[in-house]
Image: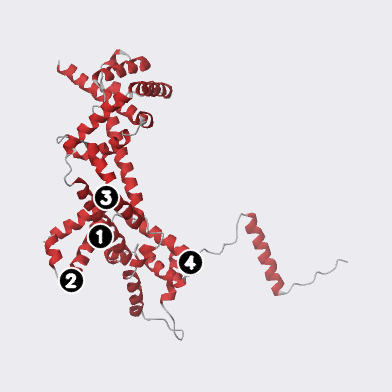
């Protein structure tokens, strides 16, 4: 006789049904929900709480809550001294230029500004600063500041500095908001960054004026460089770089940009320095012919020939041949001729001033004893560019005939 099964209690039956349902879900690939990770917005809200002390379980009213928030946002200039912000510098000369434009728009000259009573001068400066920030800030600068705020908040959080975390979290949450768009010019941190950049701009401008004062360009471009390096200006520049760490990185980036734009313009033939003689360009044209072996259509110098794609192997062979040509060409005497040509460009009043910074950099680089070796890549690019210009001129003359 079969043994009668013991009847399960309701609680046991419920557990059995739950186990069966869980088994079916697992078979279908279902996974139990994971604990949700707080969103950054919620994390920022939690970090801000220390700004709002709760007494007897009752928090401040919405109106009272706004006061500490606004105070935190406006009085945040000291954050500019944090490591996360020490290297942020906005184009100093551009800051100075826009600041001067704002003054002109307000009808205030530098002399009139200096003669204003102290209180009125402070108010006017504050107004000019805000208008400068409105014109100056780009989305890129805004995003950089917001990202640095996040880095600062996380660093302070690790060290348990709750009150300071709350201040940073307030800015980080408020600035990207719709209300924050209009507040940027009033934020203490933003004003401090622009003030620092503006001060650097005025000092750089003053040093530039001091370097060029009484400098006769007829003496040669190298005299300007010598004056910059052998005067007290160099000491002032070193002092400024130490005072504003971000300025060094900014100037380095600007130098790289000037050099890259100049190199590209030379390679494309947009900047023609005439560093090579006609005879040297003829010799290079022969190298092109030998390596590329173009057909008659390409020899005509047509646009189609200029745009013809080189395969990788041929391109490398051509660059190697040109590098060898440059190595043999630039003897010490020939390098002196190139330097003299660069000096003449600096002294030429009709030469586009846009390229003056690049040419001054080039004079400095070519002044090195081993310039032909160190600047071989540039010299090869210049060859490409000048050959292109010469071919284009020949093609245009042929069309006219």
Provide the secondary structure element on which disc 1 rests: helix
Foreground mark, 1 or 3?
Answer: 3
Q: Quadrant of residue 77?
A: bottom left
The disc placed on residue 233 is 3
Quadrant that contains the C terminus: top left
The residue wearing badge 2 is 118
**Between 33 and 325, the one nearer to me in the picture:** 325
The residue wearing badge 1 is 133
Q: Is residue 160 visible?
A: yes
Whole-Å distance between the Cαs marked 1 and 3?
Answer: 30 Å
Return the disc, 2 or 3, that comes first in the chain's sequence.
2
The residue under the point 16% across, 36% down is 218
Q: Is residue 57 above or below residue 215?
A: below
The residue under the point 35% across, 31% down is 371
Whole-Å distance between the Cαs marked 4 and 3?
Answer: 43 Å
Whole-Å distance between the Cαs marked 2 and 4?
Answer: 41 Å
Rendering coords of residue 396 (x, y %): 19, 21
Whole-Å distance between the Cαs marked 2 and 3?
Answer: 31 Å
The residue wearing badge 4 is 157
Provide the secondary structure element on which disc 3 rests: helix
Foreground mark, 2 or 4?
Answer: 2
């Amino acid at each position: 006789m079969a043994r009668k099964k013991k009847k399960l209690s309701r609680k046991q039956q419920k557990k059995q049904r739950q186990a069966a349902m869980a088994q079916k879900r697992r078979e279908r690939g279902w996974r139990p929900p994971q604990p949700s990770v707080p969103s950054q917005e919620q994390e920022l809200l939690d970090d801000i709480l220390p700004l709002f002390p709760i007494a007897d379980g009752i928090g401040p009213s919405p109106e009272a809550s706004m006061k500490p928030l606004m105070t935190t946002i406006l009085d945040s200039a000291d954050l500019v001294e944090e490591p996360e912000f020490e290297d942020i510098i906005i184009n100093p000369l551009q800051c100075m230029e826009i600041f001067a434009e704002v003054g002109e728009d307000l009808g205030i000259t530098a002399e009139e500004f200096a003669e204003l009573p102290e209180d009125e001068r402070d108010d006017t400066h504050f107004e000019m600063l805000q208008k400068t920030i409105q014109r100056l800030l780009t989305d890129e600068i805004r995003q950089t500041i917001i990202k640095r705020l996040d880095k600062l908040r996380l660093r302070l959080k690790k060290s348990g500095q709750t009150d300071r975390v709350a201040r940073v979290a307030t800015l980080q949450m408020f600035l990207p908001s719709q209300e924050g768009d209009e507040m940027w010019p009033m934020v203490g941190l933003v004003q401090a960054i622009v003030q620092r950049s503006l001060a650097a701009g005025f000092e750089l401008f003053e040093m530039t004026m001091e370097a060029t004062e009484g400098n006769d360009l007829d003496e040669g471009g190298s005299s300007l460089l010598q004056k910059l390096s052998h005067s007290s200006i160099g000491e002032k520049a070193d002092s400024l770089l130490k005072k504003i760490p971000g300025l060094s990185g900014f100037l380095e980036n600007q130098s790289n940009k000037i050099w890259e734009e100049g190199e590209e313009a030379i390679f494309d033939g947009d900047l023609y320095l005439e560093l090579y003689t006609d005879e040297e360009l003829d010799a290079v044209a022969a190298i092109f012919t030998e390596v590329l072996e173009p057909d008659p259509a390409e020899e005509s110098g047509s646009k189609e020939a200029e745009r013809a794609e080189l395969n990788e192997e041929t391109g490398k062979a051509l660059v190697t041949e040109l590098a060898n040509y440059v190595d043999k060409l630039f003897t010490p005497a020939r390098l002196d001729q190139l330097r003299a040509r660069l000096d003449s460009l600096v002294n030429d009043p009709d030469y586009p001033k846009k390229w003056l910074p690049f040419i001054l950099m080039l004079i400095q680089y070519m002044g090195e004893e081993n310039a032909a070796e160190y600047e071989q890549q540039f010299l090869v690019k210049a060859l490409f560019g000048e050959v292109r210009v010469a071919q284009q001129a020949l093609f245009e003359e042929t069309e006219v005939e």
